[in-house]
Image: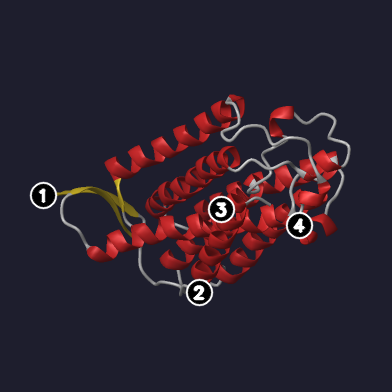
């Protein structure tokens, strides 16, 4: 693990600990219809473009050279696996499931609340996608299968995109954003704890399967989990701050029971 990776890993662990220490808030979310729609669209565009363009760019710091097992730290070396298509596929299915899971909110919340929650959730997940793509490019690291004979069927552009784990980043961002949004909006809901257990259970399985698939080291997954948790918490937190500040001005979405209002203040 090079020095840049070590520094980022230490920072990611700090952010994870900070995020986990936060309390649950009994405050509602608030979005500005115009501003937050633009932010959401920008996040989706950044996620898509970074996914398409960054893998085709040359390495930012030059070639990594030949994979050398002696350069892998003891923890990661002890938990290295050869490539497994089955675990790779299973982890991808779990990642998509973690992102789609909060759509179940539609079954238990009013349409107006669901729209507000969906905008905030979309911002968090799209941000996680974009950030993990950028870090994969800026912090290249060979995947474990590169030390175990390669991986048939995996595109070679993926070979040095091990750190941090994108699947873990997105899964934990989805879990944390979903749980945080739900807890802030409905702190007394009897479904909160089961939803949190299911969300984080899927995220943990996603990370574990990435390791057993030979696609990531343990430290890749832990860093991705920390990064995703931070993003998943901070995006709803910013909307909570905005609501608690009760700013004047702008076009906003507000709800009252089953009714949705578009309100403009000046």
Q: What residue is shown at x 64% (from left), y 67% (from top)? A: 197
Q: CA distance from mark 2 to mark 3?
A: 18 Å
Q: Which of the two marks, 4 or 2, is nearer to us in this view?
A: 4
Left or right of 95? Residue 90 is: right
At numbered mark 1, what does the secondary structure look like: helix, strand or loop? Answer: loop
Query: Tag on residue 266?
Result: 1
Nearer to the camera, 179 or 194? 179
Nearer to the camera, 3 or 112? 3
Crowding at dot 3, Cα within 10 Å, few <14 / some 14-19 / many 20+, comes out as: many
Left or right of 252? Residue 229 is: right
Q: CA distance from mark 1 to mark 3?
A: 34 Å
Place residue 30 in its image quadrant: bottom left
Q: Earlier in the sequence, mark 2 or mark 3?
A: 2
Q: Which residue is mark 2?
A: 21
Crowding at dot 4, Cα within 10 Å, few <14 / some 14-19 / many 20+, comes out as: few
Q: What residue is shown at x 27% (from left), y 66% (from top)? A: 244
Q: Which residue is mark 4?
A: 73
Tell me if I can see residue 108 in this picture.
no
Q: CA distance from mark 4 to mark 2?
A: 29 Å
């Amino acid at each position: 693990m090079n020095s840049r990776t070590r520094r980022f890993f230490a920072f990611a662990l700090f952010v994870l600990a900070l995020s986990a220490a936060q309390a649950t808030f009994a405050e509602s979310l608030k979005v500005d219809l115009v501003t937050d729609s633009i932010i959401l669209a920008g996040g989706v565009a950044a996620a898509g473009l970074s996914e398409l363009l960054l893998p085709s760019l040359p390495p930012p710091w030059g070639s990594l050279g030949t994979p050398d097992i002696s350069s892998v730290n003891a923890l990661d070396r002890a938990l290295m696996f050869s490539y497994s298509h089955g675990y790779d596929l299973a982890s991808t299915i779990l990642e998509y499931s973690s992102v789609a899971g909060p759509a179940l909110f539609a079954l238990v919340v009013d349409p107006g609340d669901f729209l507000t929650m969906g905008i905030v959730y979309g911002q968090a997940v799209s941000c996680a996608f974009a950030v993990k793509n950028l870090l994969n490019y800026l912090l290249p690291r060979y995947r474990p299968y590169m030390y175990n004979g390669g991986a048939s069927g995996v595109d070679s552009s993926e070979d040095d995109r091990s750190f941090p784990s994108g699947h873990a980043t997105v899964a934990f961002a989805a879990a944390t954003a979903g749980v945080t949004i739900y807890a802030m909006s409905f702190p007394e809901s009897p479904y909160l704890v089961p939803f949190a257990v299911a969300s984080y259970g899927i995220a943990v399985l996603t990370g574990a399967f990435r390791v057993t698939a030979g696609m990531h080291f343990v430290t890749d997954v832990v860093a991705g989990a920390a990064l995703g948790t931070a993003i998943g918490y901070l995006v709803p937190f910013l909307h909570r701050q905005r609501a608690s500040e009760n700013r004047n001005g702008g076009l906003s979405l507000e709800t009252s029971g089953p009714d949705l209002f578009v309100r403009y203040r000046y």
